Image (cartoon, rainbow, N blue to C red):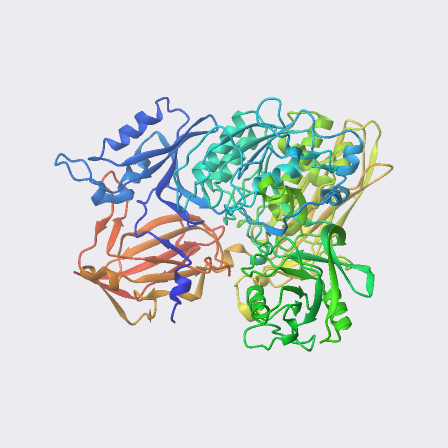
Amino acid sequence: MKISLFAAALVTVLSVVDAAQHPKIKLSKNSKKVADSYIIELETSYTGTHASFLKSIASKFENADITMRQTYDSPLFKGMSVKIGSTASVDGVGKRSLHHTGSSGVLAAFAESPEVRTIYPNTITERPKVTVVSKSHSNSPELMFAHNLTQVTTAHNYGYYGKGLTVGILDTGVDYTHPALGGCFGKGCKVALGYDLVGDAYDADKNPHPVPDNDPLDACGANSGAEGHGTHVSGIVAADDHKYNFTGVAPQAKLGMWRIFGCTGTVSDDIIIQAMLMAYEAKVDIISLSLGGSSNWEEEVGSVVADRIVGKGVPVVIAAGNAGADGYGQIGSPGTGKRVTTVASFDNSHFLAAYFVIAGHEDTKYPYVLSSHASPSMPNGPIVPSASTDTVTNDACNGSPVSSQVSGKIALVRRGGCTFDEKAASVEAAGAIGMLVYDQSGGGAFSPGSTTNTIPVAGISTDAGEAIFAATHGQRPVSVEFFTDYTAVAIASADTVSSFSSIGPLNENQFKPNIAGIGGQVFSTLPLYLGGYGTYSGTSMATPYISGSIALFLEATGKHQDPTYILEKFQNFAHLAPVTNGMEGLDNPIRQGAGLVQIVDTIKDAGHVSPAQISFNDTAHLVTSVTLKISNKGKTAITYTISNNQSMAVSPFDVANSGYTPLPAIAYTTDAATLRFSTRRITVKPGKTVTVKVSVVPPKTNPKDHIHYGGFVQFKASGNAKTIHVPYFGVVGNNKDLPIFDTTLLGLYSNDLSTEYTSNQTYVLDRSNLATTTPYIVYRLLSGTAYIEAQLLDSNKQFIGYTETDLAYIPRNTLESGAQYYQTTWQGSYVPKGFKQTSSSVAAPDGYYWIKFRALKQFGNPAKNSDFETWLSPRIQLKN
């Protein structure tokens, strides 16, 4: 099998030996890593300074090159992040050479220290990705649409605005000069707290040298490539613009901004951890993070720190991620933390768009959305189709004719067949002065994204495209007039889970996401250099929506409440969504969590059920029953009728046609569990608590399909009390049966990746010519694994050491560019098995070897060989 060199350039390339084998070292292929950089957690009992500890490690080496990056001195996390160099020489008196041992030897020294608790990789988190719907202002406050879906408008009418609460945000900085965000920074201002940990030029990939200062202002400028993410997030929480009647969820709340991204680029874990600890130590009431990596494991270092903060009484609200197109099990860290509030996204009810009218049909307003790269306006004038038929499948694509009639006019182009860039280039070459692209399958107005064209490009609905085509009769130009006013456009998927929202559960069936906010088509503040306002989509937007809602709840019910209780109350009264509007079938909790926040019901109702979410796990590890506690903090008794409100089940695989490659778009089935209750009806007196036992009988589906069933335990209330729902899910099958390696993409390849070697062949690795003879091992993971071991076997197939370090908490691959598979190389060195002070990478003698990969199955026991899935490479001849 030949591997594309282009594709290979996109995947993660791992170092030959990262570190020695040791249980303290928690390395991960979660994402790109800062090269030779690690986060060292010290034991809480350590009383020395960071500098003295680092000096003690460096003393074991001659001319050690170990640089301190960040230091942590919090009761929640004590330690440092370091960068390990690789140049030194042996001093002749027994000290180890960094040149000889590499970072693995230094890590061995760290791990052997009794003062070290855990060592984590310093991984890189990509910049939050949002869909830019528009960057434009409107006199109509679009966020009000969302507020009507979540009861926030009613909460404001009750007088709850978040007064007295502070929300700490970790993001790209904020343009606090924006009138809606107070116009200033510091004491007495809306943006009262914060710090810039990185500076404008910082990028963990390309410029990993932070230049911190005490001002979190986003002043990147319109030409910087910055998207104003942090300002948009801040506005959702607490904007208050009296001029345009635009208010965030908690407009009287204060904000803190800890800037962790430069104007463009990425951030490393050690910066994120530092910012979380700074926000916690600043005594904010809520911490909000609209970011995440692709982990789906709760053991990531950011997830661990976030969970500890929650344990100290501060709610930490984190985006689930925007990987809905990658199938199930794609929650991003640190949103994988055990007790953090992980937020899914629902779509807004309407969005605002500019509109146009067609000559002779002026009573009908058709919305349009400009490309984010297009000029700020579309010219008025005649429009004509680029094709003579409205059924062409590759309209204006290369090789397709474009009508000469488009010259000097706006071209109407049907969507599909090629990129928007290609279509725009084709019609521009034919002389068009603009392009309207219409959806071909009943869709609404949409953004054509970021195009490189020079003519304005906009997306319009199917109805609008058909109306223009009818008016032109396919050939005759017709006049259209574009208006800068805005019209409200209904969203067909309103009040349902956004297609981009990441899907749970975690790899060992932990319940995620927990709750949902409005994240699809959200209008909010942008930096003034980007025009001041705009509409973005993403779980990045849903997260501050929940953070602001918690501020309203704490204002109404009292500060300093247990974050678990707060989340449970939000889950109890969330609004349940169907899979599709107009059709029966509730969406599964692994997509919507408990549902969409309903803040007034959460504040006002006296009922409370705990726990507020249930994972019955898979049938091999089945949690057969759960006891729920129903409390009444009101003044009158409440009677509840208990039932099973089943949701649709999620089918993550199409086993018959594609095996255990997770479907990029999950399928649904009607398979449902039976729930049995110890009682069907209970009365809870004021101040009392009653328990109900809930037992599950999973549906009788084929265990090989791994159906994720689900639903909601429903407590229908009497009188004026609100009905409470407790979401549940489970899996028919055994996670341990899921294959780890994709055998269709698993093998040893030549240095140019053109040739795959089979088990009866021998690969020759010549150390005198590593540039052309270094082999590649390419592998794709169908399931996440908690542990991979790369063993080196000698000529007798005896295990002698590791070709790379044991790696922990590894996410599965997806079909996304750059994430389809992993690749690693071997150049003839290894870490001997066992772990001693002298353990380090050594050169293997000339001879014959095999490399054996062992991946721990989900729920597997690392002490049992049968719980590992293995792969053995072809024989490798090593010579000089």
Q: Position of residue 861 (x, y in %)?
A: 44, 49
- Of all residues, the one furthest to the left in this rendering is 92
Residue 509 in the image: above or below residue 434: above
Q: What percent of the width, then of the height, locates residue 796?
A: 23, 61
Q: Nearer the viewer, residue 550 or 833?
A: 550
Nearer to me, 359 or 40: 359
Quadrant occupied by the N terminus:
bottom left
Toward the right, the furthest residue is 719
Q: Is residue 300 visible?
A: yes
Residue 466: x %, y % from top left: 74, 69
Q: Is residue 18 left or right of residue 330?
A: left
Apparent side of residue 823 relative to residue 342 in the rendered image (left or right)? left
Residue 141 image-quadrant placement:
top right
| Residue 142 higher or lower than 482, as above or below | above
Q: How many marks?
A: 0
Against 238, residue 846 (above or below) is: below
- Left or right side of 421 for 687: right
Decide if residue 527 is in sight here: no
Q: Quadrant of the C terminus?
A: bottom left
Q: Is residue 279 left or right of residue 17?
A: right
* Residue 775 x/y as whole percent: 29, 62
